[in-house]
Image: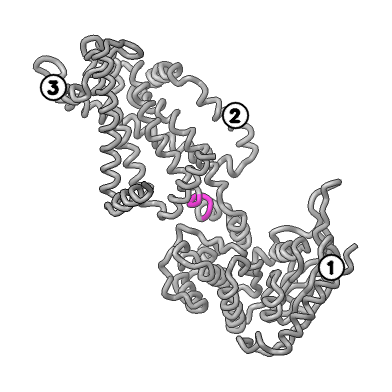
Amino acid sequence: MEDVIAGSQGRWEQLAPRTRRVISVVGVILTLVAMWELYKLVWGALGWIRPIRPDDVVMPHTWDMVIELFRPVRRGGGLLIVNLAGRSLWTLREAILGFFVGGLIGFWLGVWFVRSRLAERALMPYVVASQTVPFLAIAPMVVVWGGGLGIPQWTSVSVIAAYLTFFPVAINTLRGLRSPDPNSLELMRSYAAEPRDVLWKLLVPSAMPYIFTALKVSATASIVGALVGELPAGFQSGLGRALLTFSQQFAVQSKKLYGTVIVCALVGMLFVWAVTRVERRLIPQRAALEEEDATAARAAA
Amino acid sequence: MTDLVVDAGGVGKTFGKGEDRIEALRGISLHVSQGEFVSLIGPSGCGKSTLLRLIADLTAPTSGELRINGKPPARARTDRDYGIVFQKSTLLDWRTVSKNIELPLEVMGIDGRPDVAARMLDLVQLADFADHHPWQLSGGMQQRVAIARALAFNPSLLLMDEPFGALDEMTRELMQQEVLRIWDETETTVVFVTHSIPEAVFLSTRVIVMSPRPGRVSDIIEIGLSHPRDEDTRESQLYYAKITEVREALRRYEAAKP
C-alpha cells in the first residue's frame, strides 16, 4: 500500500509544476461541479427539499449557468457575457483605484506606527475599530458624501474599496517592518545610518513578503468593497448592480445571477493573480517561500 | 597614547533597576594597541559580548571611562571607526553578494562602490560569487561576505562576536586561517569574542580571560606564537602550552566559585 502511494507521488512529482497546477485547479472545479450535480440528482430522486430545494431555479445545472452567459441578456440584446465583461471593467476600475489608495494609506500608517510608538498607541485602536464598523452600513453614507463633494460616483465606490484594503496592509506592513533580525538593525546603527536609509534599505525590503501577503487579501477585499459600494450608487454600470438586478429577478432569472457570481469570482481571481505576478518579480524566491512557510506554521499552530 | 585603539578604564555595565538589576560588567580595564588581535574568552554570562557591544556603542557603559581611537564610543561609531561581524551573517537576502558588500558604502555615501566590492571579494576569495544571493552560499562563505562587508569602508578596528560559532569544526579552522591572512593583509586591529580556547589561542596576540557574575577580566595571557601561523602552529609545543594556560585560567575561576 505504501509502495502504491509512494509510486503515485513519484509520478505526480515528475510532472512539470505548471501541469500539476493546472491539474489541481481543474480537479477542484470538477469536484465542486460533481458535488453540486450529485446533490441535485440524489435529492431530486428522493424528493428531499432540505436544506436546499434541488429544483432548476434554486439550483440550476452548472452547465446551464455557463450556457446562460452566452445567451442574450434580454430579447434582442447583447450576450450576457459581453454585458458582464463591460461591467467587470467598470468594477475593476473602482476596485483598482481603491486598492492603490487604500494600499498607500495602509503602507503609510505602518511606516508611521513603526516610527512612533505614540502614534501606534493612539491610533491603532481606531484602525482596528474601523473594521468592526459594518461597511454595508457606511457604504450608502460614503456615496451620499461623495455626491455632496461633487466627485464622480464611481470614485465614491473606490472609497469603500480603499476602506477594506488599507487595514490588512497597515497591519502587515507594521509586522513586516518589525521583522528584521536585531543584529541587522545594530549593523545599520554601526554604520551610523540615517533613519531614511534604515527604512528604505532594511525595513521596507524586509517587509515586502508581509506586504504582499496583505495585498493578496486586499485584492479580493477591494473587489468585494466595489461590488457592495455599487449597490447604493445611482448608476447602472458595474457587476454589483448586475448582482442586485438579477437577485431581484431570482425566481425567473436565477441562472443569470449564478452566471454573474461566476464572473465576479473570476474577476477576483484575476486581480489576485496579477498581484502574485508582481510579487514574483519583486521578491527573491526565498524570502517569499519563507514567509509562506511562516504563514503555514502560524496557521498550523 | 594615541596608538591605543581601545582604552577602557574601570568600565561597568548594569542592566535593569532595583530587584531586577544585573551587573554584567565590573571594573573592566582593557587596552588594545593598533595592529593587535585580542580575543575575549570566558564562560557564558561573563559579559564578553556586552563588552564588545560597549566598544561598538550599541549599548552605553554605566560607569568608567571608555575611549575608541581616543574618542568617546558614540563619536567613533559616527566616524565609522569600526566594522562588526556577528555570529549570524545578517546578509540581506534580496541583495546579491556584491550588493551586500556595497551596503555600508551606500549608507555612508562612498563612491566607486563596485570597485571596492570587487576588491573585497578578492580579499575573501569569493570573486566568483559576486552575483549570487546569500542563500546560495554555505555558512562559511556567508561569514566571509560578512567580513568583507565589515571591512569595505576600511575601518581601523574589526569587532567580531563569535563569528564562527555556528560553523562546523573544519570550516571553522579554515576561517581562522582566513581571518589571520586578512588581518595580516589589512593591518586592522581585531577584537574577537569566542568561547573556544583553541580558536582564541590560534588567532590572538593576547587573550583576555573573563569570569562571570559580575563580568571581570581575570587574566591576560600573551600568546607569543610567531606569525604567520598555519597548520604547523596547531601542532607546536607552545600552542599546546598556551591552550593549557588559558584552560587553567578559566578553571581557576571555576575552582574559586563558592
| Residues packed near mark 3 inside 10 Å, few (<14), some (14 to 19) or many (20 plus) | some
Dividing the picture into quadrants, the one containing residue A191 is bottom right
Magenta: main secondary structure equals helix
Q: In the rendered structure, are the residues bearing label 2 and label 3 in contact, judged by CB atoms less than 8 Å apart?
A: no
Between marks 2 and 1, how big is the CA–CA gap? 53 Å
Return the residue found at the far left: A76
Q: Which residues are magenta?
A: A202-206
Instruction: Identify the secondary structure beneath mark 2.
Output: helix
> What residue is shown at x 51% (from left), y 44% (from top)?
A297
The label on residue A141 is: none
| Residue holding disc 2 | A125
Question: Marks 1 and 3: same chain?
Answer: no
Q: Amino acid at mark 2?
A: Pro
> What residue is shown at x 41% (from left), y 67% (from top)?
B131
Mark 1 against mark 3, which lies toward the viewer? Answer: 1
Q: Is residue A156 above or below residue B165?
A: above
Q: Is residue A134 above or below residue B165?
A: above
Image colouring = one colour
| Residues packed near mark 2 inside 10 Å, few (<14), some (14 to 19) or many (20 plus) | few
Q: Is residue B85 above or below residue A167?
A: below
The x, y position of residue A23, in whole percent, is 26, 42
Between marks 1 and 3, how big is the CA–CA gap? 89 Å
| Residue holding disc 1 | B254
Read off the chain for label 3: A
Q: Amino acid at mark 1?
A: Glu
The label on residue A71 is: 3
Along the viewing direction, whichever of A223 and A253 lies nearer the viewer = A253
Q: In the rendered structure, are the residues bearing label 1 and label 3 in contact, judged by CB atoms less than 8 Å apart?
A: no
